[in-house]
């Protein structure tokens, strides 16, 4: 009993430390301390830990490959060129530009992951919109939202998907069968709500001539990168279809781009090294260990039976509770630990026949969409506070917040019904 | 008389035309555009927020931490396109207004600064001993009504409340 209590305490403290980050401790350090304590106190044997980490090579390789691909694509100017081309095609219509940013956001998210859109496309769009002297806020909302909304179009659209799918061995067919309709629905809902929300800002016209031509260091290199990215995207889809390890595609793609970049004398090793977040590996590895220790304690089984008890016998309701629970959890404790808690929980439920496979996809949807809540909270409250500080009257920002918060549960609820129908 | 003319990203020419209608010749007019650092700060805090694949921007006044990218060396020029865009937009806005002024026979000085627009406008007016601030009620975003408390944007509102001199509030945009 004491053993169980101590293990649970370490688990909860680790999650709390990741969430609150006391003493400005990083998430990686917080997770590493938790994992070390679990090891030292014998909740997990060193042999098991090493076996577990080595067994997850696909995840680590996928993350590393994706980071390199995104960094090189960024250095090649892909994101600026796409943003500016969208403005040129929109030909002065702010509404068309707005829809265009949605489209490229969904495209980059689908094949290069949500973070590529959120972290690399967003600054490029910021620069473009600023130059065009259009209101910035609607476009920032589009970039940050579509990154999460489009992140269950394909398994590669969000690393969280791989994290969950990895242990269920589900292929592209099953993924698309459960998630394609919910994903398309969520994107359409997102576009519709934003078109309504920002309708006044979108009435303006802009001068496409205000945008300078993007000066590429090497047009040949740019063309190479575009073609290589296209090939990587196709390879990702094919690999998901064949259930081949996605890390192989990500790493081969990264190597292909790095060689091309080096051949065209465009590679900046120092910058590339700087853009790889090494601590992420510590973070994910540590969370793996903590969750395994908790699994050994039987805590995740209890969590699973709690989930079933909470949701009763209705599959629709179970699916909904799973999706909304994952979404809230992803906001509260970061989506990596949340996804990894859900994996053994769902395993125990599906293995005992208490739940359908659809729950896995409900969890994926929840973990992917959930961060939108934080994003809304973050962007809207920041703007709101900024404006309050100036003692101005700006009701519209509060409106953004309300509608933004409203749209996420709507997407989750409708998505749940669609998953349940599959 | 020294006049400080606050130019936002849009509507500068309209403001100048109206100003020219109400003042005679022979005044010292200064066009000031302030690059608003607020939206950019918010954006950078978001970019340093909890995301998995980090794209480090030069660390600003954010909390450090490896997962937030701030402890990594700043990527060379990652924020440069955003800086350039802000400056280019400001210059375009000022230039539009200056040309309109030149057409109407006003000689003007121009200035671009960075910070919180409302505070810098008030501070500049005080420091330069301006007798009048000319400003648009709002830049017309979000379908703002023509009258009532919401017709005046936060920048103009702050300037009205804190200006050390007279304010010409131009509503027609």
Image: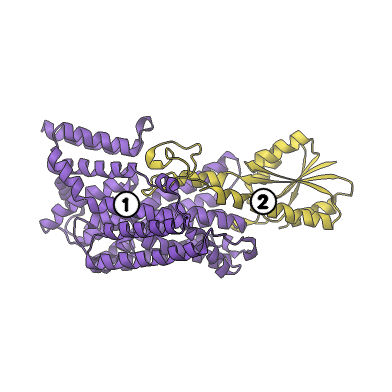
Specify the colour of chain B.
yellow
**Colour scheme of the rendered structure:** by chain
In this picture, residue A141 sits left or right of residue B29: left
Residue B156, given in percent of the width and then of the height, sits at 68, 46
Tag 1 residue: A63
Residue A416, given in percent of the width and then of the height, sits at 29, 62
Q: Helix, strand, or loop for circle 2?
A: helix
Tag 2 residue: B90
In front: B170, or A101?
A: A101
Q: Residue at x 38, y 45 (%)?
A: B50
The quadrant where residue A231 appears? bottom left
In this picture, residue A8 sits left or right of residue A101: left
Q: Residue at x 66, y 42 (%)?
A: B118
Dot 1 alpha-carbon crowd within 10 angstroms: few under 14, some 14 to 19, many 20 or more: many
Residue A177, given in percent of the width and then of the height, sits at 26, 69
Quarter holding the C terminus of chain A is: bottom left
């Amino acid at each position: 009993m004491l053993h169980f209590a101590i293990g649970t305490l370490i688990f909860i403290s680790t999650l709390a430390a990741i969430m609150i980050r006391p003493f400005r401790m990083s998430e990686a350090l917080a997770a590493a301390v938790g994992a070390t304590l679990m090891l030292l106190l014998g909740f997990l044997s060193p042999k098991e830990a090493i076996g577990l980490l080595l067994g997850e090579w696909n995840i680590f390789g996928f993350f590393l490959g994706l980071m390199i691909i995104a960094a090189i694509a960024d250095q090649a100017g892909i994101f600026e060129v796409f943003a500016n081309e969208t403005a040129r095609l929109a030909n002065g219509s702010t509404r068309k530009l707005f829809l265009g940013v949605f489209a490229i956001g969904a495209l980059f998210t689908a094949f290069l992951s949500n973070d590529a859109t959120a972290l690399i496309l967003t600054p490029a769009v910021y620069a473009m919109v600023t130059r065009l002297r259009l209101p910035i806020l609607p476009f920032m909302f589009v970039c940050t939202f579509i990154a999460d909304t489009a992140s269950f179009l394909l398994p590669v659209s969000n690393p969280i998907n791989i994290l969950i799918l990895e242990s269920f061995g589900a292929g592209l067919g099953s993924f698309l069968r459960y998630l394609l309709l919910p994903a398309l629905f969520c994107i359409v809902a997102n576009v519709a709500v934003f078109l309504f929300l920002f309708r006044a800002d979108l009435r303006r016209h802009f001068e496409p001539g205000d945008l300078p031509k993007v000066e590429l260091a090497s047009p040949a290199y740019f063309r190479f990168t575009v073609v290589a990215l296209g090939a990587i995207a196709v390879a990702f889809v094919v690999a998901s279809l064949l259930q081949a390890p996605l890390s192989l595609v990500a790493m081969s793609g990264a190597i292909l781009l790095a060689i091309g970049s080096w051949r065209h004398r465009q590679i900046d090793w120092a910058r590339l090294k700087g853009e790889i977040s090494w601590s992420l590996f510590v973070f994910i590895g540590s969370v793996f260990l903590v969750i395994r220790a908790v699994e050994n304690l039987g805590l995740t089984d209890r969590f699973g039976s709690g989930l079933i008890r909470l949701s009763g016998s209705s599959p629709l309701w179970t699916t909904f509770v799973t999706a909304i629970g994952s979404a809230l959890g992803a906001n509260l404790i970061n989506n990596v630990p949340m996804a990894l808690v859900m994996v053994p929980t769902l395993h125990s439920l599906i293995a005992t026949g208490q739940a359908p496979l659809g729950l896995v996809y409900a969890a994926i949807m929840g973990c992917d969409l959930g961060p939108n809540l934080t994003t809304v909270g973050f962007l809207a409250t920041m703007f709101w506070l900024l404006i309050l500080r100036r003692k101005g009257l700006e009701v519209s920002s509060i409106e953004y917040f309300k509608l933004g918060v409203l749209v996420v549960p709507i997407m989750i609820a409708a998505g749940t019904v669609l998953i349940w129908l599959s | 008389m020294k006049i400080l003319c606050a130019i936002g990203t849009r509507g500068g020419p309209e403001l100048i035309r109206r100003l020219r209608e109400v003042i005679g010749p022979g005044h010292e007019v200064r066009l000031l555009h302030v690059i608003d650092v607020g939206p950019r700060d918010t954006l950078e805090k978001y970019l340093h927020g909890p995301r998995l694949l980090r794209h480090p921007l030069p660390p600003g006044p954010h909390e450090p931490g490896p997962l937030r990218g701030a402890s990594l060396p700043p990527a060379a020029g990652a924020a440069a396109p955003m800086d350039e865009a802000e400056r280019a937009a400001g210059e375009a806005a000022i230039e539009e207004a200056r040309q309109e002024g030149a057409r109407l026979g006003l000689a003007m000085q121009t200035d671009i600064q960075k910070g919180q627009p409302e505070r810098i406008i008030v501070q500049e007016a005080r420091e330069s001993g301006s007798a009048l601030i000319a400003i648009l009620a709002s830049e017309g975003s979000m379908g703002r009504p023509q009258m009532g408390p919401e017709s005046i944007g936060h920048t103009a509102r702050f300037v009205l409340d804190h200006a050390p001199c007279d304010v010409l509030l131009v509503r027609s945009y």
